[in-house]
Amino acid sequence: MNPQTPTLPQPGSRSNPSFRRIERYSTLKALFALLLVLHGFIHLMGVAKAWKLAPVPQLTQQIDERTGALWLLAAALLAVTVIALFAWPQWWWVVGALALVVSQAAIITSWSDARFGTVANLIMLVGVVFGFLTQGPWSLRAEYDREVARGLARSAAQPLPVESDLAGLPAAVQRYIRLSGTVGQPRIQNFRARFHGEIRSAADARWMPLTGEQYNFYDEPSRLFLMDASMFGVPVQALHRFIGPSATMRVKVVSLMTMVDASGPEMDESETVTLFNDLCVFAPGALVGADIQWQELDPHTVRASFTNGSRIIHAELVFNERGELTDFVSDDRSAASADGKSFIRMRWSTPLRDYREFGAHHLMFRGEGVWHAPSGDYAYLHFDLDAIEYNVGAKGDRR
């Protein structure tokens, strides 16, 4: 059952294409922040000129003290923008827009000397517009945050899973749950996970670097996954939303143009498979008490039938000698077309490896998504699990 998939570079290796692309993104962000810092220091020249703190021969026009206060305000707002860019990434563009307006107003007062500062403000304008499109109130990020907030508002006390709760489960599943460190820990109501990796739309398509954040909830089974990627340097954002019986997947380029808008029965069934996959991979403790029928095929392989509402999906789980889950295979998932309007059912699997400790939990660190297409198997997703936390409260940090 295990697909033959390429060997990934070691975690953190600079030979990893995804690592290099994410590093380039971080470099661009740092350069943008540096531009704002330098821009802010240049504004301080206007303050020094107005308040006669130091000679500033570059500024030949007179600047009165009131206008000097405007230059100081612009410098301060640019400094706050830099801080917000890293500490408040979802709303930095609000401060940035204000800083941009004040900065340009200050430049206009000394246009003949300071007009070239408009170039920096034009670059800043591009960043602010991008921030608004990707983080603003009508973005996929904002929709994701609203749905997460609704899920986190629900909380209830849950009993601790104990050894007796494992009775009746196949031996391989029992061993996996114990190994995960779940027994004796609070029962999982939700989890939040962060990833990085790379993704592609077809076997011959270009890999795109990605970072992702995901929330799953188990009181009312639901899955929210937000992905940021880039295609030829152009930012792409995707939101998977599965709440209740229905699922949607939307992909936008520059958070403006819809590239994929997928929904319908095939999407609902596919996301049910993914919901169960997440349950097995990231929250094995929640397998206890879930609506699952198990069939033991051999000491290392089980078949599961998972029910969510009126929908039932099937999968096979493969475990190694240590008891770790190494593969999840299902024939109940469908690959969406490039625009998300049509689907092709095909076998789907998620090979897993490199288990590590995440707090009290022993989980996989590296995984893949593989389509078993008629033309041949191919991996379309490589990802590393960066962090995971369980039973996040309504006031949890969701940046």
Image: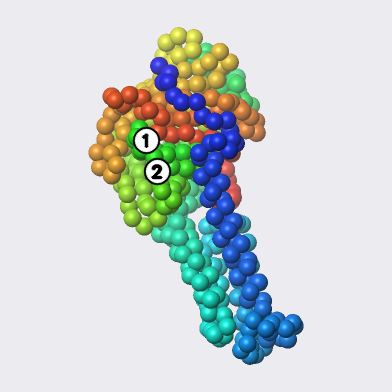
User: What is the crowding at mark 2: few (fewer than 14 residues within 10 Å), some, or many (at least 20)?
Assistant: many
Q: Residue lying furthest front in this view?
A: 57
Residue 261 makes an appearance in the image: yes
Residue 75 lies in what quarter of the image? bottom right
Could you classify mark 1 by the number of other residues whose Cα lies within 10 Å: few (under 14), some (14-19), or many (20 or more)? many
Q: Is residue 312 above or below residue 12?
A: above
Q: Please name the amino acid that badge 1 sits on.
A: Glu
Asked if residue 310 shows in the view, the reply is no
Classify mark 1: helix, strand or loop: helix
Judged from this view, the residue extending furthest toward the left is: 342
Vertical order, 208 against 349 (above or below): below
Please state the total of marks drawn on the protein image.
Answer: 2
Q: In the picture provided, is 321 more to the left or to the right than 242? A: right
> At which x and y percent is residue 107?
55, 80
23, above or below 13, in the image? below
| Residue positioned 53% across, 84% down in the render | 111
From the viewer's side, name the closer residue of 289 and 145.
Answer: 145
Q: Position of residue 213 (x, y in %)?
A: 50, 44
Q: Secondary structure at mark 2?
A: strand
Rendering coords of residue 24 (x, y %): 54, 49
- Alpha-carbon span between mark 2 and mark 1: 9 Å
Query: Which residue matches tag 1?
Result: 271
Q: Of residues 163 and 157, which is closer to you in this image?
A: 163
Name the residue: 64% across, 81% down: 58
Residue located beneath label 2 in the image: 240
Q: Is residue 368 left or right of residue 12?
A: left
Q: Residue at x 68, y 86 (%)?
A: 50
The reply to whether callout 2 and callout 1 are in contact (CB within 8 Å) is yes
Q: Left of 29 or right of it: where is 379?
A: left
